[in-house]
Image (cartoon, rainbow, N blue to C red):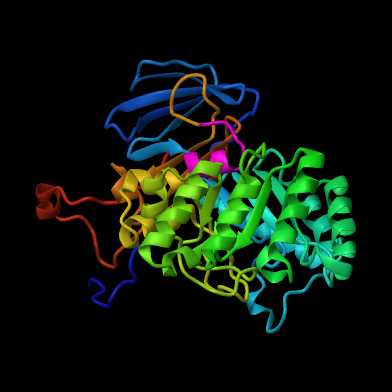
């Protein structure tokens, strides 16, 4: 007699194992869709894109990965993350600055963001005061362990640089650069003399040939205009963020300030997913106003599950989604903010899915960019010409065996991912 008892739903299929990739061997990405609608094969070698051709037209003696059903994009970059406090929200108190804890959290946070697609990250790290230089050492060790997986650069952030108290901050900042920090940062809003702070930062950056990346709320247009005038022409460049205060200004002073930032060549790194501990006020910079003035706008994550934002995801596609859904950017412009503009803010070369460009790529399940931003969980991440992260998301519904009418209706059913 047949068993009439309810049966458990079938076990979901296991996701495929990532394809092992020899970093020295060529890699062929097959059947990927581009944002212009073409379906192509992309051959990678030597860390660069060797060729792009119509699907089925390219050959390789290396590894082949089927990306049918995936959208292939330039990989995002993360211009603004706090590696020293990341993933500390559950600690039940202030973030631990024990170097072992910082190194573990910084490594885990970078891998989390790499899984989302960010192959290059800029980590802001406090130096001096309670943190000393131990946190910087820990994040630099994390950077070393991540080589080959992701490119992590470190911003040294002293608290005070002016007056008697600032002497120690200046000494610590110079030591941080000698140790391996490659960007001069900080928060002038927290110094008794914000303009003096910026002057000190720019002087040290000029001495060492370093970029500058400063935190400011930008609520004072006169002060921000002075920042821009002081920073104008500095090479290799200046980034200000999150500049949420600009959105609270009346239209006329906000527009004048945007024009001055554009004239100075300053990049603004906004944080659509939430603020960060270095700036007390929240809010997102007026991205449409800034872009219309000619300011390069990049988008970062800010706090990643620390006290400032205990639910921060560190996902660049979510940042792009928020820029498109809440701040009026097109999906294309929103994705540019987390990819092309973010890479430019970090001083990295441009990436296009064309022969000769760096093989820094993200494949996302979906037919087009709007669908990829709303949201897509299955992702394949390529850094330096090899697959470094692979996420497969399979959604199952209880008792959802395909019926004839489903097939006739052409309802989409998510597959198991590339193989």
| Residue in the image at 33% along x and 22% along y | 55
Residue 245 falls left or right of residue 373: right
Residue 223 position in % (x across, y down): 59, 62
Residue 275 relative to residue 3: left or right: right
Left or right: 178 as drawn, with respect to 392: right
Q: Give how far across and how far down residue 335 sits, in percent.
A: 40, 46
Q: Residue at x 61, y 32 (%)?
A: 384
Work out which residue is located at the far bottom of the displayed protein and give it. 92
Residue 65 seen by the camera = yes
Rendered view: 404 above or below 243: above
Q: Is residue 340 magenta?
A: yes
Q: Quadrant of residue 131?
A: bottom right
Against 64, residue 364 (above or below) is: below
Q: Tell me which corner region of the image, top left, top right, bottom left or bottom right, holds residue 387.
A: top right
Residue 294 on the magenta span: no
Image quadrant where one finds the C terminus:
top left
Please name whichever residue, 281 or 61, is drawn nearer the observer in this view of the structure. 281
Residue 36 image position (x, y, % from top left): 29, 31
Q: Which residues are magenta?
A: 338-350
Q: Nearer the viewer, residue 126 or 366?
A: 126
């Amino acid at each position: 007699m047949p068993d009439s008892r309810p049966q458990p739903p079938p076990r979901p299929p296991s996701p495929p194992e990532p394809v092992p990739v020899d970093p020295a061997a060529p890699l062929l990405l097959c059947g990927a869709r581009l944002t212009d609608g073409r379906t192509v094969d992309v051959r990678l070698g030597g860390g660069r894109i060797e060729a792009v051709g119509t699907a089925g037209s390219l050959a390789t003696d290396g590894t082949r990965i089927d990306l049918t059903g995936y959208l292939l994009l330039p990989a995002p970059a993360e211009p603004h993350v706090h590696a020293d406090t990341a993933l500390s929200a559950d600690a039940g108190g202030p973030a631990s600055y024990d170097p072992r804890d910082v190194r573990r959290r910084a490594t885990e946070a970078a891998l989390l963001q790499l899984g989302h697609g960010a192959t290059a990250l800029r980590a802001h790290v406090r130096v001096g005061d309670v943190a000393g230089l131990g946190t910087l050492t820990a994040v630099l060790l994390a950077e070393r362990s991540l080589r080959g997986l992701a490119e992590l650069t470190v911003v040294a952030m002293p608290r005070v640089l002016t007056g008697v108290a600032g002497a120690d901050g200046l000494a610590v900042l110079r030591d941080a650069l000698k140790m391996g920090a490659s960007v001069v940062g900080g928060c002038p809003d927290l110094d008794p003399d914000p303009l003096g702070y910026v002057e000190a930062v720019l002087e040290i950056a000029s001495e060492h040939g370093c970029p500058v990346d400063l935190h400011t709320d930008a609520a004072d247009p006169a002060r921000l205009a002075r920042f821009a005038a002081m920073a104008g022409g500095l090479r290799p460049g200046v980034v200000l963020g999150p500049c949420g205060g600009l959105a609270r200004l009346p239209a006329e002073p906000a527009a004048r300030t945007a024009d001055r930032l554009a004239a100075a060549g300053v990049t603004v790194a906004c944080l659509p997913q939430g603020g960060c501990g270095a700036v007390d006020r929240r809010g997102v910079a007026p991205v449409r106003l800034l872009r219309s003035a000619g300011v390069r706008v990049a988008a970062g994550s800010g706090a990643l599950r620390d006290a400032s934002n205990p639910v921060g995801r560190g996902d660049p596609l979510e940042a792009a989604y928020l820029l498109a859904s809440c701040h009026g950017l097109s999906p294309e412009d929103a994705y540019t903010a987390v990819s092309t503009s973010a890479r430019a803010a970090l001083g990295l070369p441009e990436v296009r899915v064309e022969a000769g460009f760096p093989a820094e790529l993200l494949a996302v399940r979906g037919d087009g960019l709007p669908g990829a931003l709303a949201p897509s969980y299955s992702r394949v991440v390529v850094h330096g010409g090899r697959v470094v992260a692979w996420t497969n998301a399979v959604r199952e519904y209880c008792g959802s065996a395909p019926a004839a009418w489903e097939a006739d209706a052409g309802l989409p059913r998510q597959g198991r991912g590339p193989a």
